[in-house]
Image (cartoon, coloured by chain):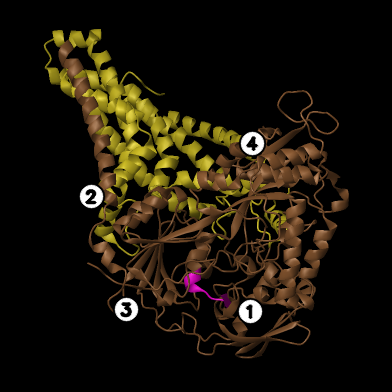
Chain colours: A yellow, B brown
Amino acid sequence: MIQYLIRRILVFIPMLFALTVIVFALMQAAPGDPFSQKMDPNIDRAIYEKQREALGLNDPIHVQYWRWVTNAVKGDFGDSLIYKGRTVADLIAERFSNTINLGIMTLLITIIVSIPIGIYSARHPYTPLDYGATTFGFLGLATPNFFFGLLAIYVLSIQLGWLPSHGTVSKPGIEGFELFIDKIRHLVLPSLTLGLAGTASYMRYMRSEVLDVLGSDYIRTARAKGMTENTVLYKHTLRNALIPIITLLGFEVGILLGGAVITEGVFQFPGLGTLFITSIGNRDYPVIMAINLMLGFFVLLGNLLADIFYSIVDPRIRYD
Amino acid sequence: MKFKKSWLLLLSFVLMLGILAACSGGNDAGTEPEGEGTETEQPAEGPQKGGTVVGAMDTPPSGQFNPIFYEEAYEANILSFIYEGLLSQDENLNFTPGLAKEWSFNEDNTELTFKLEENVKWHDGEPFTADDVVFTYKMLASPGYIEAGGIRSYFAANLVGYEEFSTGASQDFQGVVKVDDYTVKFVFAQPNVKALADASFTIIPEHIFADIPMADMPAAPESRDAGKIVGTGPFKFTEMVQGEQYVLEKNADYWKGEPYLDSVVWKVVDQAVILGLLETGEIDFVADPNGFQAADFETVDAMPNVEIIEQPDFGYQIMGMMVNHRAAGDKTLDPSKWTVNEKLKDQKVRQAIAYAVDRQAIIDGLLYGRGIVQNSPIATQFEAYDDKNPPQYAYSEDEAKKLLDEAGYKDVDGDGFREDPAGKEWVLNLNYPLGNQIRERSAPIIEEYLEAVGINIDLRQPKEAAAYFEDLDNNAQDWDLYLVGWSLDSTDPDPTGLWDAPAAYNYSRWNNAEADAILKEANTPPEAFDKEYRNGKLSEWQVKFGEDLPALILYAANSLWAHNTRLHGVDVLPYSFLNDTHLWYVTEEE
C-alpha cells in the first residue's frame, strides 16, 4: 500500500510538469498581456513598455518559463502583476482558507443530505417522499446557481434578516468562538447555493446505485440466508453502492477547491474562483500558473484519495 | 398508484408556482413605503456627532493603498478619505485650496509657489511640511519608480530636471523646492498651462516612506496594511478584511475640524445585492465607480429611504472611424508612415455615418434615458466644452443617404447595399470588445442603423478586452469602425492625449494638421494662460473634430449614485461623491 502510494505520488510530478508547460504555452499564445487593456490618456505607453521590460514579459517564452519553474521549485511563485506589492503565495493563501471552508461545508451538506435521502428513496421507491425527492432533485439540477443564490439572499437575508448576504465575516477584529460562529453563519448561504446541484445529483446517483445493488443476486442470497434488512442494507448494499459515489466525490474535491466563480461572485465571497477568473482576464500570469498548478495537484490528490477509499469500502480492491 | 403519481406531480407543480408567486409578492411588498422613511428628509437639529456610515462597492480593491502606486477606482474610494493633495477642485472644476492655502505664479509662469496650511498633522501626529511635498514629487520622478510599478510620473514630468533625475544622470531634483517649512515652489521646465493639475497630486508622508527603497515600496506594510497607512485626511484607515471590508475611523485632529461621523465602512457587495441592502439600510451609499444600473432607476427611486444623485459622468463611449491605418508591426507613432483607409477616407461618408445612427434612441433604449448625446470629445462639465458650434448630427436617415449619394456611394448592383464610387463592394468592419454590457448591446443596433442607409457592415465577433485592445493597438489594419469607451480626467479638458495625431490612443489614426495646430495653440503659453483664449481655441478644435469626424461620440452615461436619507451633508462634486466627508453626519430615525 505504502509503495503504491509513493508510486502514485511520484506520477504526480511529470503530470504537473506537463500541466504547467501546457498552461504556460496556452497563456502566452493568448493575445494581450497585463498592460494591453490599461488605457489612460495621461499615461505614456512607453511607461508600460518599461514595466513589461522590468517584469521580463519581453523575454522569449522558454526563458520566462524556465524562470518560473526554477523559482516555483524553490517555492517562490513570484509577485502578482495586478495586485501590486503582493506575492502570489500571499494572495492564494488568503483566498485558499475561504475556499477550503466553503468546500468542506458544501461537501458536508452534499453528503449529509444526499446519501440518506438517496437510500430512503431507493428503499421506498414510488412513495410520496421518493417523488418529493425526485422533484427536488430535478429542481436542484435545473436551478442556476446565481438564481438560487440571489433568491436565498433575497428571502433569508434581505427579507427575513436571518443570515448575512455577503463576505466571510461581519466585521474585522472579532475572535475565538464568536468568529467561528460568525464564519459559519456566512458560509450557510453560499454553501447551500453551491451544494444544491451536487446534492440533487448525488441523491439521484445514490438512489439508482442502491436500487441497482438491491436487485443483484448477492443481495437475494443474503436475504435468503435470513439476514436482517438492516444488515443487508448497511453491510452489503451500501458498501457496494458507495463505490461510484466515491469516484465522483474525488472529482468533486478538485472542483470545489477550484472555487465557484458564480457563487463567489453573488456572495462576494473572496475565494479562489474569482481570483482565478480576474487573473485570467487581466493576464496575471504568475497567479494563473500557481492556481493551475494547485488545482492540478488537488484533482490528482482527490483521485488518489478516492482510490484509497475504494479499498476501504471494497476489500476485494487491493493495491500492491 | 397511477392516480397517486399524477396527483403528486400536480402538487409539486403547484408548490413551485407558490414559491415563485411568493417571491414576486415579496418584491412588491419591498418597494412599499415603510412609513418612517419620509419624515427624515429634514433633520430636526443641526449636525450630530457619532454614527457609522456604510458604503458599498461591487468589486474588491486590489489592496494597494499607496497613492503613488494604486491604480484603480476602488482603492481611490478608500484613499480619498485618508489622503489629500495641495489642491482640490470645486463644482466648476476650478482649483481650490487643499493642503495649500494659497499660490502664485512668477512672471513667465515657470514657477508656482504654494503657501501650505500650517496646522496640519499626519495621522501619527507628525506635522505636515514642505518636506513632504518635495518628497512626494521626488518619488514620482525617481529612477526605478516606473519599474516598481508606478504610473503617475506624468505629474512630475513637466518639472525642471525630471529627465536627468529619473534616468539617474543627476542625484539632485530641483523640480520641487522647499523655500521654508510651509512654502514650496514647483519649477517647470517650460511655462506650463497645466501647472495646477500637475501640482494636485496626493501628498505622502516623508517620515514614513523615506527609508523604504523604491522597489520595496509597493509591498511595504505602509502601502498595504490598515493601521500602518498614514495620511492627513479626515479618516484613518484602521482595520480591514481584505477583499471584503475596509474600516475608516475619524481623525479627531483633522485640520479642517473633527469629523461628525465616528467611522465609515466600505463593504464589497455584489452589484445584484447592493440595492436590496440599500433598501434595508444595511448599506448607506453606493457611488463610484459603478453606482447602480440605469435599469434599476425606478426601483431605487421608489425606495422611501434612499435619495438618488444623477449627474453626467466624465467619460463617453465612441464609435471610432479609422481614417488611417498603421502599417503592420509598426509600433512607432509616426503619422507619415500611415496609410489612408480608402473605405472611410471621404469626410462625407463619416458624416453620413453620424447622421445614420439615432443616438438618442440608443440612450433611451439601453440607458433608460439616463445619459446624454454629446458632440465633442471634451467632458461636458468643463467650460471648454462647446455644445453649440460643432455639428450636431441629429438623427436623419435622409441626410445620411443624401451625403452617401453625393460622395458617390450608390447601390449599383441592386443588392440593397451601396458600392464604393468605383462600383466595387464596400463593407465596413465593425469591431467591439466584451466587458461593458451596454456597449455590447449597442453594436448590433448600430449595425442595423447603418445597414438601413445601405452601408454593408461586417459586425465582427466581440473579443475579450485584453485581446481586443492589443489588436486595436497593433493589428487593426483591416478595421474600419471600433467601439471604445473613455474615462476623462477632471483636472484639465485638454484632449491631446486622445486625439492629437501622434497620440497612442488616437486609434482612428486621425491626422488633421489644422486640428493639431489649433490644439497646440490652445496649450501654448503665454496666451493659453488666458482661459477665454484657451477655451476659444478648444472650441475651434471641437468644430474641426466634428466636421472631420474621426469618431462618433455615441453617448455619455450619467453617474447614478444613491444614499440613505439618514446620511446628511453629502455635497457631491462633478467627479466624486466623496467631498468634505468630515461634514457628513447621520440622523438615526429608530
State the extent of the magenta-drawn residues as a range.
B80-89
At label 2, which amino acid type do we have? Answer: Leu
Image coordinates of residue B258 in percent, x first then y, are 40, 82
Element type at marker 4? helix
Mark earlier in primary sequence (4, 1)? 1
Q: Secondary structure at mark 3?
A: loop
- Mark 4 and 3 residues: CB-CB less than 8 Å, in contact? no
Asked if B387 appears above or below B509 in the picture, the reply is: below
Mark 4 belongs to chain: B
Is A122 inside the magenta-drawn segment?
no
Q: Where the C terminus of chain B falls, by quadrant?
A: bottom left
Foreground tag (4 vs 3): 4
Q: Are marks 4 and 3 on the same chain?
A: yes
State how far apart marks 2 and 4 are (Cα): 47 Å
Given the image, what chain letter belongs to the residue carrying mark 3? B
Task: Name the spot of residue B421 as percent of width and height, x first.
Answer: 84, 34
Identify which amino acid the numbered label 1 is placed on: Phe
Badge 3 crowding class, 10 Å Cα cut-off, few under 14, some 14 to 19, many 20 or more, is some
Quadrant of image for the N terminus of chain B? top left
- Is residue B85 in the magenta section? yes
Tag 1: Cα neighbours inside 10 Å, few (<14), some, or many (≥20)?
many
Residue to which mark 2 is pinned: A160
Which residue is labeled 4 in the image? B447
Residue at 82% in and 36% down: B408
Disc 3 residue type (three-letter): Lys
The residue under label 1 is B135
Q: Is residue B288 left or right of residue A267?
A: right
- As drawn, the residue found furthest toward the bottom would be B180
Q: Nearer the viewer, mark 3 or mark 1?
A: 3
Tell me if mark 2 has few (under 14), some (14-19) or many (20+) residues whose alpha carbon lies within 10 angstroms of its own: few
Image disc number at residue B49: 3
